[in-house]
Image (cartoon, grey):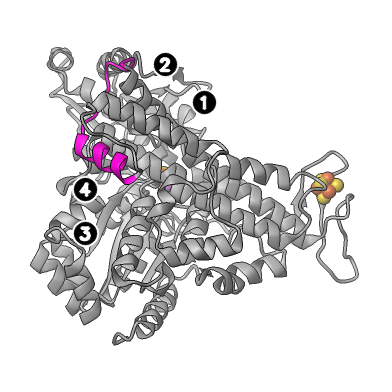
């Protein structure tokens, strides 16, 4: 058993808003994620991936070797057990993104069928472009007709009729060839995770390497399938992001406003809540109760979705979700799914905050549940906003503490927006790469994890990379960290190396570009693919790296693995639970390079991680005949 020593509040987070709220949480008697981590004694078998619960001959604990070597009752050894556990971990992550993508697909289909009156196609140009890209004829077809055609086509990506997912066509030829040779071309968004569950049932796939390869295929079905569909359809339905200004941290909450937080991942509900909150009738109701207005702010990735498209401020990332409620200033949290701590209903009940679940897939006992459907979204959103307004009259202003001032940020860098900033083609960026002004590109993505000091690894890694002239793109919960550190403003160029700062100043862009939510990591895949195709090389030859410095979730592991399987070297701040198998660990941290041209690098120290990633960028530059 291992147990973390109890840490001081100052060591838990990089930020004052978090620390002030941690003090208040203690005073208000609110238990947080850090308190619960302190109470956990983590089992070393589980940490190493050496427990198996896949049948009732077990559960089994496996000992890899030595005098006490012990296999599972069925005979599974350490390598097989770790591979099976990791495979299921990846399948769960891929399934989560993909099921989120499916929800967007269902809304698109209903828009096409005319049964979702509250939604519409907001970017018809993109809808048309994607239809053409996928070979669907759209001559003389209206938006609803195109929506039907595209939905119909993409439904098949979820099934088992395809040899390759539709968006695989975006990958460079060399990568497609490599996937074919390895037998990992993703075929069906639902098929690959389901096949993983089958393979890892007792007595099916008993070869750890074979299971790991299928893990890669499953992750690819997420990146080039479910997540990419989630991103593209969100753009079509809610608008493709363009650069805009907004703000971050708990200071975005307003003491004199009704505060509504949207939390989760999908824009389907949060966009409707935002529209309802902007309705003059709702505003009048709020003013009648003495509020100055209605303030919608985001948490986690649904926050990123609204931030990217609507400039809605972000109250916080994963580890700030409980603390946001501790301000005592939040009337309502509207949640959809993923990364919503079950503790939130308890925290909400310590204040006047109403917690609302909206997806029938995600129920939260202790909270209110309001089923949202494409057919009733506007009406339900209005009901919720009215309830939030009403809750404002119950707020105890004596218990309100909103720490800090909002930090300004720039957001909205979809690939379309990046191309626009560059004047319509990637060439200026590729020229800067060749000249060495921009030495490489790093995607910093993912979560927070209370085992690591909140946002410390994110911001220090980003600072170190931009200092070395590596342009950073950011998604997910890492975004808030970058914003709080001032890295999402053009003035952040002051912290960049000479080449990158020159490029940022010329284009008036920040050295860290916000490219979206976690499904939007698919934008990074597409950007890398475009760069590789333009240079006539494979993605693995590019000076491009990725990092999930403070990851915690199954989804983040799937993202990391699809990045690696797409040829992008990927840093993790924490190891997954695989260290009990030498074979799997060696494969993840070295062997994958022989297969995919990239592997994982595990390093909790952001300064050392920056050096490792920088060395990779330098090596790839040399490989392309460029100055390191
Ligand atoms: Fe969740 Fe996407 Fe991680 Fe944040 S970054 S903690 S997965 S919300 Ni996706
Ligand atoms: Fe034990 Fe094998 Fe059953 Fe797993 S599948 S619980 S190792 S007997």
Q: Quadrant of the N terminus?
A: bottom right
Which residue matches tag 4? 412
Q: Is residue 323 visible?
A: no
Which residue does the numbered mark 2 point to in the structure image? 370
Residue placed under numbered mark 1 in the picture: 361
Residue in view at x 63 percent, y 69 percent:
587
- Ligand 1 closer than 8 Å to the CB at disc 4? no
Task: Tell whether 209 sits left or right of 98.
Answer: right
Q: CA distance from mark 2 to mark 4?
A: 30 Å
Determine if the magenta segment contains residue 123: yes
Frontmost of labels 3 and 4 is 4
Cβ atoms at labels 3 and 4 below 8 Å apart: no
The x, y position of residue 180, in whole percent, is 55, 60
Helix, strand, or loop for circle 3?
loop
Of circles 1 and 2, the one toward us is 1
Specify which label sits upstream in the sequence, 3 or 2: 2
Provide the secondary structure element on which disc 2 rests.
Answer: loop
- Specify start and end residues of the magenta stretch as a single range: 114-133
């Amino acid at each position: 058993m291992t147990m973390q020593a109890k840490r001081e509040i100052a060591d838990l987070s990089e930020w004052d808003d978090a620390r002030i709220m941690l003090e208040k949480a203690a005073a208000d008697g609110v238990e947080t994620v850090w308190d619960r981590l302190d109470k956990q004694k983590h089992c070393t078998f589980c940490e190493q991936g050496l427990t198996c619960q896949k049948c009732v001959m077990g559960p089994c604990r496996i000992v890899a070797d030595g005098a006490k070597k012990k296999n599972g009752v069925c005979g599974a050894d350490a390598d097989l057990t770790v591979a099976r556990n990791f495979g299921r971990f990846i399948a769960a992550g891929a399934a989560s993104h993909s099921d989120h993508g499916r929800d967007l697909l269902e809304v698109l289909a209903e828009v096409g069928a005319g049964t979702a009156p509250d939604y519409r196609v907001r970017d018809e140009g993109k809808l048309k472009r994607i239809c053409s890209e996928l070979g669907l004829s759209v001559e003389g077809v209206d938006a609803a007709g195109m929506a039907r055609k595209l939905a119909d086509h993409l439904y098949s990506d979820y099934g088992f009729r395809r040899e390759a997912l539709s968006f695989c066509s975006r990958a460079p030829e060399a990568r497609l060839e490599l996937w074919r040779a390895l037998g990992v071309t993703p075929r069906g968004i639902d098929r690959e995770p389901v096949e993983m569950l089958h393979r890892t049932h007792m007595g099916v796939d008993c070869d750890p390497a074979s299971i790991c390869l299928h893990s890669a295929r499953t992750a690819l079905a997420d990146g080039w399938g479910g997540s990419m569909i989630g991103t593209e359809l969100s753009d079509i339905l809610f608008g493709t992001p363009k650069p805009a200004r907004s703000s971050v941290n708990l200071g975005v909450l307003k003491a004199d406003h009704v505060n509504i937080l949207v939390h989760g991942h999908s824009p389907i509900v949060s966009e409707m809540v935002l529209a309802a909150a902007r309705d003059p009738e709702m505003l009048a109701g709020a003013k009648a109760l003495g509020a100055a207005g209605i303030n919608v702010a985001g948490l986690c990735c649904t926050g990123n979705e609204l931030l990217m498209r609507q400039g809605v401020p972000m109250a916080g990332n994963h580890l700030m979700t409980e603390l946001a409620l501790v301000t005592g200033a939040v009337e309502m949290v509207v949640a959809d799914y993923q990364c919503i701590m079950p503790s939130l209903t308890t925290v909400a009940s310590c204040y006047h905050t109403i917690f609302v679940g909206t997806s029938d897939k995600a129920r939260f006992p202790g909270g209110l549940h309001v089923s949202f459907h494409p057919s009733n979204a506007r009406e339900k959103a209005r009901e919720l906003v009215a309830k939030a307004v009403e809750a404002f009259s119950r707020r105890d202003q004596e218990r309100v503490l909103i720490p800090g001032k909002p930090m300004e940020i720039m957001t909205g860098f979809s690939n379309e927006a990046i191309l626009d900033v560059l004047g319509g083609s990637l060439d200026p960026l590729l020229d800067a790469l060749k000249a060495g002004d921009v030495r490489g590109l790093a995607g910093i993505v993912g979560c927070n994890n209370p085992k690591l000091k909140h946002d410390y690894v994110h911001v220090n890694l980003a600072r170190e990379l931009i200092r070395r002239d590596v342009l950073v793109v950011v998604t997910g919960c890492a975004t808030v960290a970058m914003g709080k550190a001032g890295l999402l403003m053009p003035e952040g160029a002051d912290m960049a190396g000479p080449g990158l700062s020159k490029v940022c100043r010329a284009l008036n862009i920040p050295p860290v570009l916000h490219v979206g939510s976690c499904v939007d990591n698919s934008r990074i895949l597409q950007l890398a693919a475009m760069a590789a195709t333009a240079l006539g090389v494979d993605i693995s030859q590019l000076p491009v790296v990725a990092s999930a410095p403070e990851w915690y979730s199954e989804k983040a592991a799937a993202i990391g693995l699809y990045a690696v399987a797409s040829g992008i070297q990927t840093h993790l701040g924490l190891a997954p639970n695989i260290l009990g198998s030498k074979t799997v660990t060696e494969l993840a941290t070295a062997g994958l390079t022989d297969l995919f041209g990239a592997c994982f690098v595990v390093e909790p120290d952001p300064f050392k991680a920056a050096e490792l990633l920088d060395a990779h960028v330098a090596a790839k530059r040399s490989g392309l005949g460029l100055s390191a």
